[in-house]
Amino acid sequence: MNRLHLKLYLSIIVVLVLFTVLVAVVWHSSTVQFRMLLHGAHVVLILGSVAAALALLAYPVARGITARLGRLDESVRRFGAGDLSTRVVVEGKDEVSNLAASFNESAARIEQLVKTNQMLLAHCSHELRTPLTRMRLAVERLSMGDTRAGAELSRNIAELDQLIANLPVIVASASPDVMAGG
C-alpha cells in the first residue's frame, strides 16, 4: 500500500507545483508595479513557501486514503488465510467505503455458506450412520442364527439406498437462501 500512498502523494505534489508555476507565470506577466513589489527572490520564496504548505496539507489527505485501503487489504488477507469472521470498518462515503461494505457482505455470505455446508455434512453423517448401526447389529444377530435379522438388514439397506438417493435434494434444499427464508 505504500506505493499507492507515494503515487497519490506525488501526484498531488506535481499538481501543486504546476499550479505554482502557472501562478508564477501570471505574476511575472502582470503589471510593472506588482512586479516591482515582488522582486525575483521574493517571488521564489513566496511560491516555495506556498508549495511547501500545500504539500504538508496534502500529505494527511493522501495518507488517510491509503490507510483505509491498507486496512481493507489486511482484512482481505486475514479472510483469505481462513479467518471467516473478519470484517472491515466502513469509513466515509466514497469508493473505498463501498468496497469495504461489499467485502463485508461477501464475507458474511461466504461464512454463511461454509457454516451451512458444515451443518449439512454433520446432518448427512448422522442420517447415514443410523441405518449403518442397525445393519451392523442385524449382521451380528444373523451370525448368531436370528432369522428375522435378514429382513431387518434388507429394510436398513433399502433405507440407506433411499437416503443416498435423496442426498442431491437435501443438498439443494440446504442452501443459505432457503435456510434464511429468502
Image: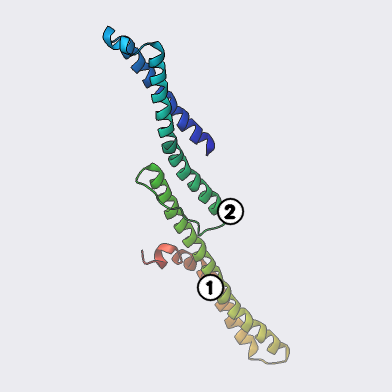
Q: Residues within 10 Å of mark 2 (few under 14, many from 20)?
A: few
The residue drawn where x is 45% and y is 53% is 88
Residue 152: assigned label:
none
Q: Nearer the viewer, residue 93 or 12?
A: 12
The residue drawn where x is 62% and y is 79% is 132
Look at the numbered disc 2 and give the secondary structure of its residue. loop
Q: Quadrant of residue 133?
A: bottom right
Task: Name the kind of residue labelled 2 in the image.
Answer: Ala
In this figure, which residue is indicated by the disc labeled 1? 123
Where is residue 153 shown, x and y percent of the image? 62, 83
Where is residue 54 shown, x and y percent of the image? 39, 29
Residue 44 shown left or right of residue 81 in the figure: left
Where is residue 131 shown, x and y percent of the image? 59, 80
In this figure, which residue is indicated by the disc labeled 2? 81
Residue 139 visible in image:
yes
Residue 15 visible in image:
no
